[in-house]
Image: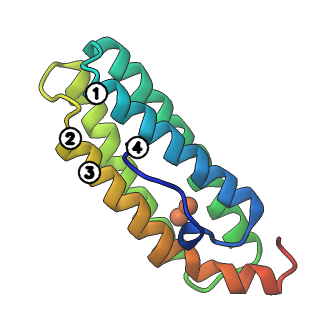
Amino acid sequence: MPLITWNESLSVHIREFDNHHKKLVTLLNGLFDDVTAKKDDALVEVVIGELIDYTKYHFAAEEKLMTKYSFPLAALHQQQHKELIAKVVDLQQQLKEGRARVDLALLNFLKEWLTKHIMGTDKKYSVFLKNKGVC
Ligand SMILES: [Fe+2]
Ligand SMILES: [Fe+2]
């Protein structure tokens, strides 16, 4: 069973961002498979690197659009992105130095963070951006 299953409740009704979120779900599920199959740490490190890079790309895309249309909650939203990136970059450093491992607790944290962020924070821009003609 995958760690996260995509469903309509995760949709922000903006095609580009739904596609980004689906890709993040796929990457996270892939990482979950690698960890449960006990793939070696070097591979897991590469996959988590891909996940972090794609997360940065996605956050930047959301922030760009929120700024473009002067979304009132943009600063608060950006702050949440910034805090997660700081956390995962720190984690990546710890993995590199052998001071941490990717385990189920970490994967559950990422799952919770992603689903809560999409449903609680990302969804707040949906109506606003749609009213600006973004679809
Ligand atoms: Fe976001
Ligand atoms: Fe998002």
104 w.r.t. 115: above or below? above
In the picture, the disc for residue 2 is 4
Amino acid under disc 4 = Pro
The label nearer to you, 1 versus 4, is: 4
User: What secondary structure is marked by label 1?
Assistant: helix
- Residue, disc 3: 108
The label nearer to you, 3 versus 4, is: 4
Dot placed on the residue nearer the N-terminal end, 1 or 2: 1
Q: On the rendered image, what quadrant is the C terminus found in? A: bottom right
Contact flag, marks 3 and 1 (Cβ < 8 Å): no
Tell me the distance, in whole angstroms, between the alpha carbons under discs 3 and 1: 12 Å
- Residue, disc 1: 35
User: What secondary structure is marked by label 3?
Assistant: helix
Residue at 83 percent across and 82 percent down: it is 132
84 w.r.t. 32: above or below? below
Tell me the distance, in whole angstroms, between the alpha carbons under discs 2 and 4: 13 Å
Amino acid under disc 3 = Asn
Q: Residue 8: give x, y in percent of width and height.
A: 60, 69
Residue 23 occupies quadrant: top right
CA neighbours of label 4 inside 10 A, class few (<14), some (14 to 19), many (20+): few
Residue 128 seen by the camera: yes
In the picture, the disc for residue 104 is 2
